[in-house]
Amino acid sequence: MGPIAGSVVTCAYDANGNITEYVSGGGEILSHCDYSAFGRELIKTGSDDFTHRFSTKPLCHKTGMLEYQLRKYNPWCGRWINRDAIEEDGGVNLYLYLSNNSFDIDFLGCASVGEWIMTLIGPAAPSGTAEAASGLESLGMAKLVATRYQLTLQITLLQAEYEQCPNPELENRIKELERQVSAIQQAINNIVNGDATSKKKRVRGGK
């Protein structure tokens, strides 16, 4: 049945922030939907009148496109239908969705969580690293921290999936991601330690 005009309807979400159910005030599930990793509707039951679905974005029932704030997304192809507004600065593929990583989060349809973190913490990254001469030390540190965040998020989601359905492929994937996180953390530590050593040298030279 469709929603009743003027009635109160509550949304239910999965762990990725996708709307999976619309529930009436009396507890009746009016609509249910399950999605693929890139937003394709795999299972849909109940009313089709509700607009907001995958990633909480409104779905156009005529075109099948998801309406992000700045771009339209085609979940059946797993790509944007128009070019990136910042052109190749966002990557060579101008239609790529979340760097082909559906575990990431895209706020506006044009930047992932990692890219937003780089914007926020880049200026505050340690100075005095090996890249200081070229002025890239902040960007380098920010990229490491952003990549570590993205990999850690993937590990958390895969671990939750592994608990539900253990299999060797998932276990190996988790171990590989943990290895990468460990290597990135070591690189971050090296930058921080190098910065501390550089400061000590400057203090001694001043004396």
Image (cartoon, rainbow, N blue to C red):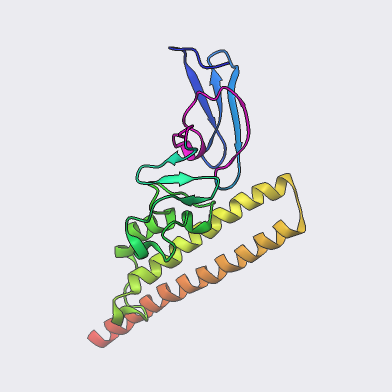
- Tell me: residue 38, above or below residue 200: above
**Residue farthest left in this picture:** 206
Q: Magenta stretch mostly in which secondary structure? A: loop
Residue 188 sits inside the magenta stretch: no
Horizontally, is 29 left or right of 186 in the view? right
Q: Can residue 26 be seen in this view?
A: yes
Q: In which quarter of the image is residue 39?
A: top right
Please state the horizontal and vertical placement of residue 198, each as a whole percent of the image: 34, 81
As for residue 54 lying within the magenta part, the answer is yes
Across and down, in percent, residue 97 comes to: 47, 54
Up the image or down, 49 lies above or below 84; here it is above
Q: Where is residue 117 in the image (x, y as percent from the top left)?
A: 38, 57
Left/right of residue 95 with respect to residue 132 in the rendered view: right
Is residue 207 visible in the rendered image? The answer is no
Residue that lies at the very extreme toward the front in this rendered image:
62
- Left or right of 88 on screen, residue 160: right
> Depth check: 159 or 99 in front?
99
Q: Which residue is found at the position 55% from the left and 71% from the top?
A: 183
Q: How many labels does the image show?
A: 0
**Residue at the (57%, 12%) spot, across then down:** 26
Taking the image as shown, residue 167 lies to the left or right of residue 44, namely right
Q: In which quarter of the image is the N terminus?
A: top right
Image spot of residue 73 (x, y percent): 45, 46
Residue in view at x 51 percent, y 16 percent: 3
Residue at horizontal 31 percent and vertical 79 percent from the top? 132
Residue 12 quadrant:
top right
Residue interval drawn in magenta: 39-62
Rendered-image quadrant of the C terminus: bottom left
